[in-house]
Image (tube, coloured by chain):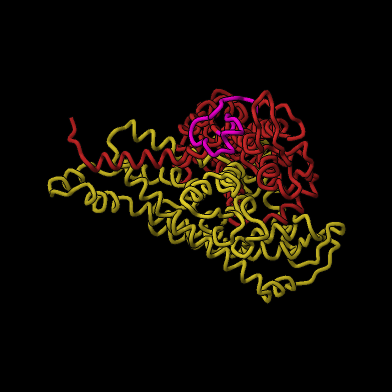
Amino acid sequence: MSSIVKPTTSKNSGLLKRMWDAKILYLILLPGLIHLILFKLLPLFGLVIAFQDYSIFKGILDSKWIGIEHFSKFMSDPYFWKLVRNTLLLAFFNLLFVFPIPIIFALFVNEVRLSAVKRFVQTLSFFPYFISSAVIVSILYKVLSPQGGLVNQMLNLAGFESVFFMADPGWFRPLYVMLNVWQLFGYSAIIYMAAMTSIDPHLYEAADIDGANRFKKIINVTLPSISSTIVVMFILAIGQILTVDLDKILLMYNPSIYDTADVIQSYVYRQAFASDGFPNYSFGAAVGLMQSVIAFVLVMMANKVSKKYSESRLF
Amino acid sequence: MKKFSWFDLINNTLLVLVALLCVYPFVLIMATSLSDGKAVVAGSVYLLPKGLNLEAYKYILGNERLGVTAGLLNSLFYTVVGGFVAVLVTFMTAYPLSRKRLIGRYTIMLLFLFTWVFEAGIIPNYIVYNGLGLVNSWLVMILPMAVNTFLLIITKSFLDELPYELEEAAVIDGANDWQIMWRVFFPLSKPIIATISVFNAVYIWNQFLIPMIYLQDRSMQPITVILYNMIINSSKGGTSLENITVNGVQLLPQNLQAASIFLAVVPILLIYPFTQRFFTKGMLLGSVKG
């Protein structure tokens, strides 16, 4: 074999030779590389407009640099703090319900002994996950409509007045969270159910001998056995806490409920794409950059912590 | 025979109810779309259609002004073409990155991961896409979706697991990298290809924000945006609907909207049996191993 692998005198030419030998691999990689550069890296450079007074007609190179003016402007704007508050509250309530419900659901599905029932429940429960938010919110509008929507019909039958849910700021957070729970719990439960399949059956037999009932077994055997999965999922959820479902918010909100529904990302969207007014790209980009930096730090911290707890991690 | 237990009875009943709750809204929409408007306005449609008819679907699909047919066809086009491109590019990116000989593979992977975690945001994206001429171009529904980093990771980890000896054997037979990828590794990757095909198809079919921002031209809009304009945004310059009577059947906006919503769900219903098999596996692979 020594005739094939020749020792190279220069390290550099060896490297080039190895790259040349893999030339077809690089050609195969080309489309993905172009995608990476155009759609993933170039927008990062586009972030410099946060420090400019960007005009789409002048372009990035000719627009005026203004430093951190946009940042100081929104930091001193009370509305920005309202956005931060709305974002955090929405994320907090979302985590409070969207996180534990799949675990509880998985624990009870795990207790089902009839495999037909188990399959039926699983199949139906993660159907909503695949449906577009545009469809789901459309259905929500129909069901909650003050003109003959199912929920208001029920309210009227019970002797209550109709409620215009989609125009009431007090209802936005509960509706957003409920919709997320409904859409995600079946799908999120999959990971816990998978963790449960690897629990040693002897543990249950031992618990039987100790006279434990079903609830005792759930609490003392199943739950501890999946605790590391729960911890990891929780840390990852914390890392992504600022990631609101922008599609859903844009579909659900309207000016009458901005008071609770307007979050950082929807505000950024309006800065650039609202039909009324002149687009303020730079200011929006600055607000968006702020959010991205905080989200990035959170994800990195979460990833670091989750590495400590188990082999599983985000990357 | 197992012993009867109250726990099982209550648990099974509750879980079945929860599961039914997950699909009930779709059943209600379907029932409304198939009912006579008179029954809908009387509030008597809960589960089964009253005055069963297909007039709402005929009206929706035959009425160009509403844009539902065009929206469905657009969505289908984006999903099929975009899904194909995405699977092709994702596989062709994951394969070289899974070969240890490829110098620079860690850096490239790191850049993918970094841009996944650190989002530039919608405005910098808009400026770049605008520069690339993607505003009001159907390519905006194809090209930016070509590589989803999460799917790239699960495809790469699948390829990482395949034995290296396969490649050695093919090299001895005189195959080059292009041939090895397609003739040796691609056939072995069918499970992961199926998974990412379904992921990509659902992802593109459900897109809302991208077409909202980039496709102002109504003739290019997918069904999600058409639905938004018809149902949610109808009072603010969206698509308006009127009460009409066709063949003795009353069609209310509710019927027509329900029919449009249901049409947007049908393709998902059709691929749902496959999603079940592949999605679950894919998700476990992705979230556990990364």
- Residue A2 visible in the shown view: no
Give the residue at x 80% y 60%: A277
Q: Is residue A157 visible?
A: yes
Q: Quadrant of residue A67?
A: bottom right
Q: Is residue B10 left or right of residue A59?
A: left
Q: Position of residue A128 (x, y in %)?
A: 50, 41
Residue at the (73%, 35%) spot, across then down: B66
Residue B36 colored in magenta in the image? yes
Disc tally is 0
Q: Does the stretch in magenta take in B168?
A: no
- The reply, left or right, for residue B169 in relation to residue A137 is left
- A263 and A34: which one is in front? A263
Whole-percent x and y of residue A276? 79, 58
Q: Position of residue B32 (x, y in %)?
A: 57, 34
Give the magenta part as a residue range: B32-56
Query: Considering only vertical position in the picture, is A288 above or below A201?
Result: below
Which residue reaches farthest bottom?
A76
Q: Which chain is yellow?
A: A
- The residue shown at (60%, 26%) is B179
| Dominant secondary-structure state across the stretch colored magenta | loop
Given residues A190 and A159, the one toward you in this image is A159
Residue A113 point in image, percent of width and height: 27, 36
- Residue at (37, 51) in percent of width and height: A229
A112 in relation to A163, above or below: above
- Which color was chain B given? red
Foreground residue among B226 and B60 = B60
Residue in the foreground of this view, choosing between B12 and A235: B12
